[in-house]
Amino acid sequence: MTGKLPTYPACAAVGFEHNPSDYAASVHCPALLMHGARDPRVSLTEARRVFEAIVGTKEFVTFEQSGHESYLRTNASQWRTVIEGFIKRAENKDPDRYVSRDEDAG
């Protein structure tokens, strides 16, 4: 192996049985899932699988120019916009506030 763990479910074959989708199914509060489109560790399909498992209100945002990294550090302005919007929608309790969006945050 080249130092990179395989992703789920293949990681179970090497003794790592952590399935983020299982944990996501227990999330019942407003959730914001942010994903870097250039993430070498977590594919868009895997991120969407976790997102779809969340049973509460949720929002999905893709940072097109980012990988597996801190979006605050690499895309501070866009990150703030996403976070502020999410919090504002949660505070307003707008029934249409949470949708699956493949929004390019940057």
Image (spheres, helix red, strand yellow):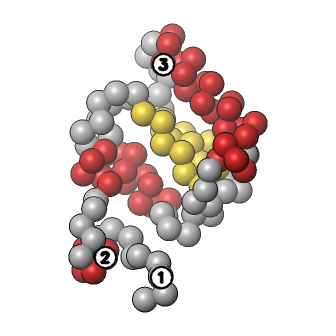
Query: Is 1 left or right of 25, judged from the image as shown?
Result: right
- Distance from disc 2 to disc 3, alpha carbons, whole Å, reads 36 Å
Q: Position of residue 17 (x, y in %)?
A: 24, 67
Label 2–label 3 contact, CB within 8 A = no
Comes first in the chain, label 1 or label 2: 1
User: The residue tagged with tag 2: helix, strand or loop?
Assistant: helix
User: In the image, what residue type sits under mark 3?
Assistant: Ala
The answer to whether 84 appears left or right of 45 in the picture is right
Q: CA distance from mark 1 to mark 2?
A: 15 Å
Name the residue carrying label 1. Answer: 3
* Residue 27, percent from left and from top: 30, 36
Q: Locate residue 19: give its quadrant.
A: bottom left
Residue 94 showing in the rendered view = no
Q: Residue at x 32, y 54 (%)?
A: 20
Residue type at mark 1? Gly
The residue carrying mark 3 is 90
Q: Residue at x 57, y 60 (%)?
A: 68
Is the Cβ of the residue at disc 1 closer than 8 Å to that at disc 2?
A: no
Q: Give the residue displayed 48% in from the left and 63% down from the top.
A: 42
Mark 2 or mark 3, earlier in chain: 2
- Position of 103 relative to 69 (above/below): above
Q: Mark 2 = which residue?
A: 10
- How far apart marks 1 and 3 lie (CA) works out to 40 Å
Disc marking residue 99 = none
